[in-house]
Amino acid sequence: MKSVTKSKMIRMPLIGDVMMSGARTVIGIVMGLVAGGILIALSGVNPFAAYASMLRGAFGSLPAFSNVLVRASPLLLGGIGVAMGIKAGVWNTGIEGYMYLGAIGAAVVAIQPLSIPPILHVLLSFVVGMLFAAVWGLIPGYLRAYKGVNEVTSTIMLNYVAIYLTSWLVSSPQPLAEEGAFYPMSKLFQESAQLPILMRGTSLHPGAFIGIAICLLFYFILNYTPFGFRTRMLGSNINAARYSGVDTKKQVVFIMVIGAILGGLSGAIEVTGLKHRVYMEFVTGTGYQSVAVALLAGGNPLGVILTALFFAALKAGGATMSIETGVGASMTDVIIALCVIFVIAVGVDGRRRMKKKTAKAETAVTTEGKEDEHVV
Amino acid sequence: MSFDLIIDWLQATLRWSAPLLLVSIGEVFAERSGIINMGIEGIMLSGALCGIAICYLTKSVTLAVLVTLLLGAVLGMGVAYLTVSRRTNQVVTGLMINMLALGATDLLFGLLSGSRHVRVATFPTLFPKSFHSIPVVGKILFQQPVSTWVAFILPFLAALVLYRTTWGLNVRSVGDNPQAAATAGLSVIKIKYQTVILSGIFAALGGCVLTLGEVGYFASGGMTGGRGFIVMAAVVVGGWDPLRTAAACIIFGAADAAQLRFQAVGSVIPYQFLQMLPYVITVISLTIMVKRSRVPKTWGAAYDPEDV
């Protein structure tokens, strides 16, 4: 009984709740950065100097900031893909695999010398890339919805399959591969299939702006369309969704495939905008980072924009820090993971009560004997 | 395709299954108590590096194993604190532990050696040299390092503990009905902590066996290659039973070994398809077996002691 009164006491009006959850994230991030600083100090580098060099590397100049935007592009698209899933209670951890498939799809079109306007060539590459990724995403989506296979395990397994598939496709006897390359890679993309560079002397391509636009689009879709409502319903109370006539299985497949399409677009942009080739391991780490982005944003598309830019700044700055101070670039991953861990660990009472209710609902389903709803 | 190749493959199957078997034991206990420790991939990776590092610095395999066990316990404690005490989402926690481990091992390995070529002694074999030359069994069994033998005996012990001891009963009851267990006077939180720490210890040991039992080197950037997730799949396929999970681990290990053998021999199938094999088999077996498994009742749910 004591806990009830306590939770009533901290009950605040809506704006207060928002402030609380915002504060929780900020506190978590600050704690993550402090812990990262301690680790930097332990490796024998002055943490203030390291963070200063990180800041300079991210915001010190216009080219530096354009680098942040370039790195934000895959995180924005991957992040929104995962965030959609989180809203629906699905863990779409396969972004890395979708990116590979999207890149392969884009490459199939982009290496062909087509006599069509560049804009069409690029768009065609995107479409084929997204199509490839959508088919890939259909596998874990179908398995989760109709076979009850946990999507975290299946998507991560499929990520490895996608990596080796890419490796095979860009190795020498295959039509995509560059012959006689010192490292297996695809042929160079046609000029007409490369995204334009927006700023001279940098590699700034429009990817980040596409990503931001898509985040805004999904903010609208999630909050103001029936599809978005069904998605959120699925995540907050699957039984209510089912009783009100939502085809929950179909919705799960939809969400997984949309996440896959976004991941595929992210991969296609990465290769047409930045790499201009496909090779093995061109996206290492982006998959997990996208999950971190979506988590820190709490599945909110607007939050995804902020956190993706924040992580991109950490990554771009981390590269500079690595060169200037000798702290390994992997420190960025460590800091990102620490931030998320602290954010989820700094819980508030209201959130806990909510979580308990979900757990209870799940148990209720089990006891009713609906075994087919179990996802393992 | 000869007799020798098959012998070689069988030997490799046992060796590559060993880390999976060890990791699976801890994970079965954790999941039986209701907590999915998805961080085993990261803990494995940490154990792999820890084993190599301590062995490199002190030249003692025993000390390396002991320190690895300690590290596993500490990391398991961290996961337990987050998932049991703070009631964080178990998937999120695991994924972030993995990301943390991936970054941290890369950093530490960079500090350990500039050249990144650390080679150390591996586990000794259990049987004297004279046994090794016995045809067939000599190669398959007696050339195995100690770790393989331990890994193949432990699942039986684990089954015994889970089904025949009071503690095992407690673990199962906590996973199936924590409220009833608490009413009966058990400390649900304590038991969950114990199992998750156990899963951390075994995951670290499995990682250590991966490096010290076989290759004797560490490759940064995820040398565990998703084996933690393969073990999680094995636990589901094996229906949360130590022995059936072990059988699933051996099948996945066999796929891994076959992949490496075929790569070495060279075949008409591109080697990348062989590399996919363990992962594809994992997904397929999950799909086939998932419906037949009996899930622990509060699998993956948070436990709140104030909840009635």
Image (tube, grey):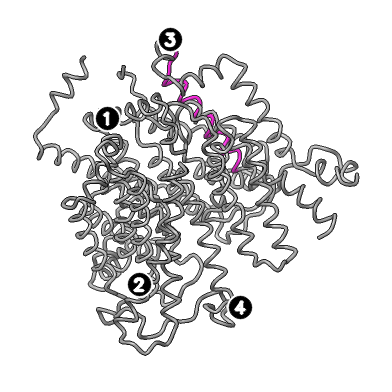
Does the segment drawn in magenta span residue B205?
A: yes
In the image shown, does B294 or B69 lie closer to the viewer?
Answer: B294
> Disc 3 residue type?
Gly
Give the letter of the chain under mark 2.
Answer: A
For residue B83, above or below residue A157: above
- Marks 2 and 3: in contact by CB < 8 Å? no
Decide: few, some or many residues near mark 1? Use Cα within 10 Å; few <14, some 14-19, many ≥20: some
Decide: few, some or many residues near mark 3? Use Cα within 10 Å; few <14, some 14-19, many ≥20: few
- Whether discs 1 and 3 lie on one chain: the answer is no
The residues tagged by marks 2 and 1 sit, at their Cα atoms, a distance apart of 42 Å
> Disc 4 residue type?
Pro
Asked whether residue A81 is in view, the answer is yes
Which of the two discs, 1 and 4, sits closer to the camera?
4
Q: Which residue is mark 3?
A: B185
In the image shown, does B37 or A92 lie closer to the viewer?
Answer: A92
- Marks 3 and 1: in contact by CB < 8 Å? no
Q: Which residues are magenta?
A: B186-207
Mark number displayed over residue A173: 4
> Disc 1 residue type?
Arg
Decide: few, some or many residues near mark 2? Use Cα within 10 Å; few <14, some 14-19, many ≥20: many
The residues tagged by marks 4 and 3 sit, at their Cα atoms, a distance apart of 67 Å
- Side of B89 relative to B208 (left or right): left
- Whether discs 3 and 2 lie on one chain: the answer is no
Q: Which residue is mark 2?
A: A126
The residues tagged by marks 1 and 4 sit, at their Cα atoms, a distance apart of 56 Å
User: Tag 3, which secondary structure?
Assistant: loop
